[in-house]
Amino acid sequence: MALTQRLEFRQSQSLVMTPQLMQAIKLLQLSNLDLTTFVEEELERNPLLERANDEAGGGEVPSEAGQFSDGDEAGGQGDGNGDSFGDDGFGGSAEAFEPGQEEWMSKDLGTRAEIEQTLDTGLDNVFSEEPAEAAARNAQDAAPSVYTEWGGGASGDEDYNLEAFVAAEMTLADHLAEQLSVAFTAPAQRMIGQYLIDLVDEAGYLPPDLGQAAERLGASQQDVEDVLAVLQKFDPPGVCARNLSECLAIQLRELDRYDPAMQALVEHLDLLAKRDIASLRKLCGVDDEDIADMIGEIRRLNPKPGMKFGSARLQTMVPDVYVRPGPDGGWHVELNSDTLPRVLVNQTYYSELSKKIGKDGDKSYFTDALQNATWLVRALDQRARTILKVATEIVRQQDGFFTHGVAHLRPLNLKAVADAIQMHESTVSRVTANKYMATNRGTFELKYFFTASIASADGGEAHSAEAVRHHIKQLIDAEEPTAILSDDTIVERLRASGIDIARRTVAKYREAMRIPSSVQRRRDKQSALGNVLSTAMSDRSRNTEPA
């Protein structure tokens, strides 16, 4: 075969991931908090980007908002001359009710006798203080005219933040550190104590093995144990324990109830979890009444003493989409404008710079900045439109959920929504990531509405997995203490309701909802029933005792 050179033209298509396309894909899957952070970074980096204020038209109010506003209905009543009312709602300004300063100063008050007759008292009673003393007292009692005198900001300021007035929460580590500074005076003991406090988790527990602590601190194991014994006496009771038994034992010692019988009970908490009362009664050497009282004392203790202190501040979940009932019986879907960053491209600034820039490098820099700013504005707009389109289709597909509840949630996958709005499944997957929808039944993540399907027993319409889980929970909540439903019984009842499901699927859904097995539920409910009956019997015997 001879090797030759030749020219050839070929036409082909390929998908090239441009930086702008990569940016649009990145913005699509960001949450509202991450998006705000990204836009703030772009505003600092790009000189041609600026934040749009409300006067520039950034805060547009949807036309449908009037359907849900009670103020519009109230404002529509009357003679229709709404513009005649002032800001205070009285048809005029506040100054209209006060006499003018010139009129007051020019008015003749008359003689001293006339003034006293008008005031019905002597002038000594009216002006009893000296002018200097009165001025000093008025200045002392006067409230600050604006909030800035208290160290905050005026309420009309854009930077006014109510979170600045929230007091810092006392954490468990801070609470223990304050007690540490009082309990120890030796620097070595304080260092060991502070190291152990840093190891305490949010529930108030230490790691089971503290051998590495002695090695890292260069101290003996006995020194660490001595410091630990003091730390375990700190408030709250039970803190710095290494396991649940030690935590309960510390609290019982604090209550002076850690006798040998209680010690045996605390050391065998596994039997208490299994409701093996007979074995516990034998180990503790007590009767039925005493073992019931001891178990009641254990239940009144706090297994997680550190949880009463504030830990990391929880971030409030802000919905991206609102779903409200429409006037025609349907559902109105709108974006949360507060989560949408509003930025503009400063074309005027770019025009002025383009006339004064002479270097090619500077021109290239501002040209790229203009292009990036334009693409960012378009990407933000496209992101908002895509989220609204996907959310609207989800509401249309899951109309039964919004009307009747979780039991009417339909099986739904990404492909069904993608085909309906003519987009790719990956786009729908990115849109539903880290996005939330506020509905009349609560706030849900968009991925919540995508559930697997479970076949129907009679060959009808498939059931949603979330609806089946809700049905299982309803059956278990309604069961009687004397008739606990096993997984096989739940399967039979679900099949009678038209849901074809396997026993292992029921067990998986039950464990996902943290519902114990039928054996454990029988023990729990019978124990609770026994406690109720014993309490009722004791109350009855107390009431029948002779006076």
Image (spheres, rainbow, N blue to C red):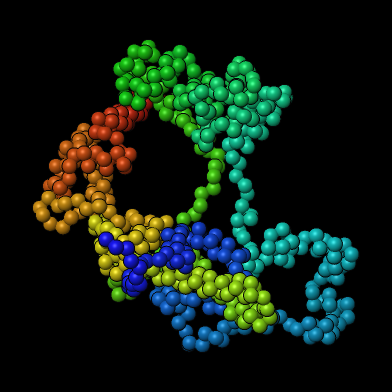
Name the residue at the left extreme.
458
Tell me if I can see residue 226 in this picture. no
Whether 269 is drawn above or below 382: the answer is above
Looking at the image, residue 143 sits to the left or right of residue 428; the answer is: right
Residue at image coords 32%, 16%: 279
In this view, the residue in front, 528 or 322, is 322
x, y percent for residue 62: 44, 76
In this view, the residue in front, 350 or 412, is 350
x, y percent for residue 153: 68, 63
Residue at image coords 27%, 51%: 466
Residue at image coords 72%, 23%: 186
Q: Quadrant of residue 77?
A: bottom left
Q: Quadrant of the N terminus?
A: bottom left
Residue at image coords 52%, 67%: 341
x, y percent for residue 498: 14, 51
Q: Quadrant of residue 271?
A: top left
Instruction: Count all numbered tags in the image, as a single digit.
Output: 0
Q: Quadrant of residue 419?
A: bottom left
Tell me if I can see residue 102 in this picture. yes
x, y percent for residue 539: 35, 29
Looking at the image, residue 33 sits to the left or right of residue 96; the answer is: left
Q: Quadrant of the C terminus?
A: top left
In this view, the residue in front, 169 or 535, is 169
Name the residue at the front extreme.
2
In this view, the residue in front, 24 or 545, is 24
Whether 252 is drawn above or below 521: the answer is above
